[in-house]
Image: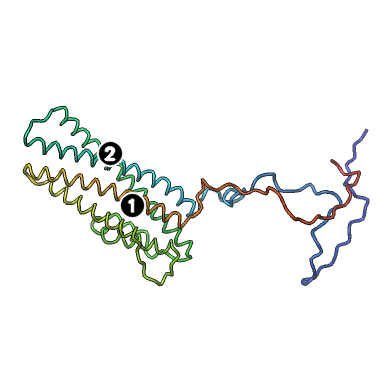
């Protein structure tokens, strides 16, 4: 026995093609003698970066901004917690110094205070370095996303932004305007208008300057000699830690607000769309299935 494969409907004449001009009327969807075997894969719709054949490894700035903002917020909250504990340790040391004027202190209590102050001062410093790095990274990506959204070039180059944020002294003056420019672009305001910072940006700028000023005063006071100078340095250190706590919380608010403006849809709340049903669709004419068609 020999098997012979034949095309279904090979003996029937193909339907005559209907001429259609440039301005001709729509004659309906195409029809087939047999159900076509081609089709789309039975999967849910996917984002363009996940379609085979596209460059899925490169994320658009808005997607990168969501990922970086999530990490930045986590690091900033960790910094806020460490700064709060460090401030409490400095306040405890200040209270012990006040009590030591009249009574002798237990060496175990003094040793515990020293360990607490040194440990959380070191942890706060290390976490500050990480927080500055991830926040500056977020700032650069946010500027790129805002520029692409507005179809304009950023008002400052990347080098100018790094100098205005990282160089001591210069960052006290330029950090606020750089953040105000980002807010101006994120809120889709006209490019020919002068940026007017919001209360959140002004509060962040004030906390930034206040923390820097207190840090310089603390370093200067610790270099002085005398018992009173040491007590004042402990009090200034506690104030510096408290302002660092406020600055970290305000930075979290800034990062979240600007990220929502530039990427309003968060990935964790997005569900892939899929077709559940089609309502009120017209019935399409179907031809009878030939008996010779393969199942």
Which label lies toward us, 2 or 1?
Answer: 1
User: For this rendering, which residue is in front, 3 or 209?
Assistant: 209
Give the quarter of the figure containing the N terminus.
Answer: top right
Earlier in the chain: of badge 2 and badge 1, it is 2
Residue at position x 11%, y 30% from top? 105
- Label 1: how many residues lie within 10 Å, few (<14), some (14-19) or many (20+)? many
Q: Residue 96's image quarter?
A: top left
Image x and y of residue 88, in percent: 23, 39
Q: Residue 94's image quarter?
A: top left
Residue at position x 87%, y 44% from top? 293
Which residue is denoted by mark 1 in the rendering?
A: 250
Residue 91 lies, with reference to residue 247, above or below; the image says: above
Question: Left of 2 or right of it: where is 40?
Answer: left
Q: Secondary structure at mark 1?
A: helix
Image x and y of residue 250, in percent: 33, 52
Residue at position x 20%, y 54% from top? 213
Badge count: 2
- Label 2: how many residues lie within 10 Å, few (<14), some (14-19) or many (20+)? some
Whether the residues at callouts 2 and 1 have beta carbons within 8 Å, the answer is no
Q: Rounded to the nearest whole Å, what is the CA distance between mark 2 and mark 1?
A: 20 Å
Q: Secondary structure at mark 2?
A: helix
Question: Left of 67 or right of it: where is 279?
Answer: right
Residue 187 lies, with reference to residue 276, above or below; the image says: below
Which residue is denoted by mark 2 in the rendering?
A: 123
Residue 108 lies, with reference to residue 8, above or below; the image says: above
């Amino acid at each position: 026995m020999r098997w012979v494969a034949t095309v279904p409907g090979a003996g029937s004449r193909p339907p005559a093609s209907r001429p259609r001009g440039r301005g001709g009327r729509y004659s309906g969807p195409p029809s087939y003698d047999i159900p076509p075997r081609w089709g789309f894969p039975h999967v849910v719709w996917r984002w363009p970066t996940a379609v085979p054949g596209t460059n899925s490894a490169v994320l658009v700035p808005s997607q990168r901004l969501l990922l970086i903002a999530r990490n930045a917020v986590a690091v900033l909250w960790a910094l806020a917690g460490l700064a709060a504990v460090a401030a409490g340790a400095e306040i405890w040391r200040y209270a012990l110094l006040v009590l030591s004027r009249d009574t002798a202190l237990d060496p175990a209590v003094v040793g515990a205070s020293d360990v607490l102050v040194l440990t959380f001062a070191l942890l706060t410093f290390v976490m500050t370095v990480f927080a500055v790095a991830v926040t500056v990274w977020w700032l650069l990506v946010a500027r790129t996303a805002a520029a692409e959204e507005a179809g304009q070039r950023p008002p400052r180059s990347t080098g100018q932004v790094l100098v205005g944020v990282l160089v001591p002294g210069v960052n006290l003056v330029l950090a606020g305007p750089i953040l105000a420019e980002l807010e101006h672009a994120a809120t889709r305001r006209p490019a020919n208008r002068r940026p007017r910072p919001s209360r959140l940006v002004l509060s962040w700028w004030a906390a930034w300057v206040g923390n820097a000023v207190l840090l310089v005063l603390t370093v200067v006071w610790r270099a002085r000699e005398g018992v009173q100078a040491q007590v004042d340095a402990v009090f200034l250190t506690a104030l510096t830690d408290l302002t660092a706590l406020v600055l970290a919380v305000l930075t979290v608010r800034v990062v979240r607000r600007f990220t929502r403006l530039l990427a309003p849809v968060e990935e964790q709340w997005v569900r892939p769309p899929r077709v559940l049903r089609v309502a009120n669709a017209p019935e399409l004419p179907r031809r009878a299935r030939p008996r010779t068609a393969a199942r």
